Image (spheres, rainbow, N blue to C red):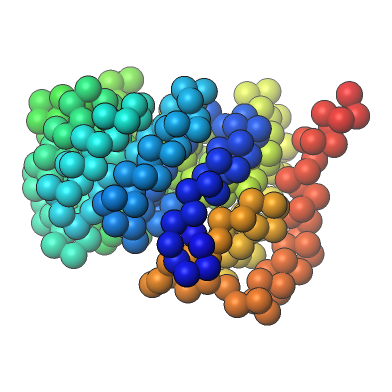
C-alpha cells in the first residue's frame, strides 16, 4: 500500500523475489495477510495478475477469491483462471453465514464453478469467520457437488478434526495446514503442505524445521517450533496484521501501511516491536541459514 492506502503494485515484485529466494513452494495470495477482503474487485484482479506475472510459473499461485458476494467471488475466480493462476480458494461469507454444511458446500460450489479448470481449496478459518462447521462433512458432501475441489486450507487449532479430515480423504483431498505456531503437529498428522502468514518473514525457521522433521531430529524440531511460538507470542499483542506488515519492513520488504479497518502501527509501537523481536533473537534466527550457506 501507498501511504494514502492506495495500491502500490511494484511492491509485489520485491515480495515475490524475497519469497522465491527463500525457497517457498507456492504462494497463497489475497488471503488474511494480503488483506484481500479489504480490496475492491479491480484491485484484487490487479494484485493477482501482478503476482502471476512476476512469479512466471516458478511456483504455484493460489488466489483467494472469497467475499461477501458469491457472484463477485465467482467472477474473481473466473478472472484468476483467465490470468493463469494455478488454483483458487475462498473463505466463507461472514455476515450472512452459512448455517449448515450443505449451505456452505453450495456456496463454495458457486464460487468454484467460476474457475472449473482450476483446483479449488476451501479456506477454513473459523476464528476469523465464525463459520465452524464439521470439515469432514464438508468433504463428504462436496465430493460430487464441487468437481474441482482439491482440499481445504485448514486454519484451526482443532488437530482432532484435522486428523479426521486426513483419515477420511485417503489422498483424495489435500489438507493445507494454516497454524504456523504448531507446524510440527500438522507434519505429524500428515498434512500435504502448510500456508501461513509468518512464512513471509521467517521462512528460514520453518524450512529448517521441515528438514529436521524429515531427518527425525525431534529435539531440533522442538527448538525451532519454540522459536516460531516465541515470534508469534511477541507480535500478537501489537495486532497481528499490522505487526506482520511492520516486520516485513524490518527485514527490508516495504509493504506499506495497512488499510482500515486494520490500523497501522504508529512509529513508537513499531520501535517497541523491533526491540521486543531483537530481545528474543528474531533477527538472528532468520539469518542463520544464510550464515551457514556463506560459510560453506
State which quadrant residue 173 falls in.
top left
Q: Is residue 285 visible?
A: yes
Query: Could you say where residue 126 lies in the image, as x and y percent from the top left?
Result: 31, 56
* Residue that protrudes farthest toward the top in the picture: 171
| Front one among 12 and 168 | 12
Please tell me how many numbered marks the rendered image carries.
Answer: 0
The reply to whether residue 240 is visible in this rendering is no
Residue 188: x, y in percent?
51, 32
Tell me which residue sits at (26%, 25%) in the image: 118
Answer left or right for 137 relative to 252: left
- Residue drawn at 30 percent across, 39 percent down: 89
162 up-or-down from 226: above or below? above
Report the residue at 24% width, 42% height from top.
76
Residue 154 lies left or right of residue 290; in this view the side is left
x and y percentages locating residue 133 in the rendered image: 21, 50
Residue found at x 63% / y 24%? 214
Q: Quadrant of the C terminus?
A: top right
Q: Is residue 294 above or below residue 222?
A: above
Question: Residue 234 location in percent, x, y?
Answer: 64, 65
Q: Residue furthest right?
A: 295
Which corner quadrant of the image does residue 40 belong to?
bottom left
Amino acid at each position: 500500500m501507498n501511504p494514502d492506502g492506495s495500491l502500490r503494485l511494484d511492491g509485489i515484485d520485491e515480495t515475490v523475489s524475497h519469497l522465491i529466494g527463500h525457497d517457498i513452494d507456492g504462494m497463497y495470495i489475497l488471503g488474511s495477510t494480503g488483506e484481500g477482503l479489504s480490496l475492491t474487485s479491480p484491485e484484487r484482479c490487479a494484485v493477482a495478475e501482478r503476482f502471476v506475472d512476476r512469479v512466471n510459473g516458478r511456483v504455484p499461485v493460489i488466489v483467494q477469491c472469497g467475499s461477501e458476494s458469491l457472484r463477485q467471488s465467482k467472477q474473481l475466480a473466473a478472472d484468476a483462471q483467465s490470468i493463469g493462476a494455478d488454483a483458487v480458494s475462498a473463505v466463507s461469507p461472514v455476515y450472512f453465514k452459512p448455517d449448515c454444511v450443505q449451505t456452505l458446500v453450495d456456496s463454495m460450489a458457486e464460487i468454484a464453478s467460476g474457475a472449473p479448470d482450476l483446483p479449488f481449496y476451501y479456506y477454513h478459518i473459523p476464528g476469523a469467520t465464525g463459520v465452524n462447521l464439521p470439515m469432514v462433512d464438508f468433504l463428504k458432501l462436496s465430493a460430487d457437488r464441487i468437481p474441482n475441489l482439491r482440499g481445504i486450507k485448514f486454519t484451526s487449532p482443532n488437530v482432532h478434526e484435522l486428523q479426521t479430515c486426513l483419515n477420511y480423504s485417503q489422498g483424495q483431498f489435500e489438507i493445507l495446514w494454516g497454524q504456523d505456531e504448531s507446524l510440527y503437529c500438522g507434519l505429524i498428522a500428515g498434512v500435504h503442505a502448510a500456508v501461513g502468514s509468518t512464512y513471509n518473514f521467517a521462512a528460514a525457521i520453518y524450512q529448517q524445521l521441515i528438514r529436521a522433521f524429515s531427518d527425525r531430529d525431534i529435539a531440533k524440531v522442538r527448538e525451532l517450533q519454540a522459536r516460531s511460538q516465541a515470534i508469534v507470542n511477541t507480535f500478537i499483542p501489537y495486532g497481528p496484521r499490522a505487526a506482520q506488515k511492520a516486520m516485513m519492513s524490518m527485514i527490508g520488504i516495504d509493504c506499506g501501511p495497512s488499510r482500515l479497518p486494520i490500523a497501522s502501527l504508529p512509529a513508537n509501537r513499531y520501535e517497541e516491536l523491533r526491540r521486543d523481536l531483537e530481545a528474543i533473537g528474531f533477527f538472528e534466527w532468520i539469518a542463520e541459514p544464510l550464515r551457514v550457506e556463506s560459510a560453506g
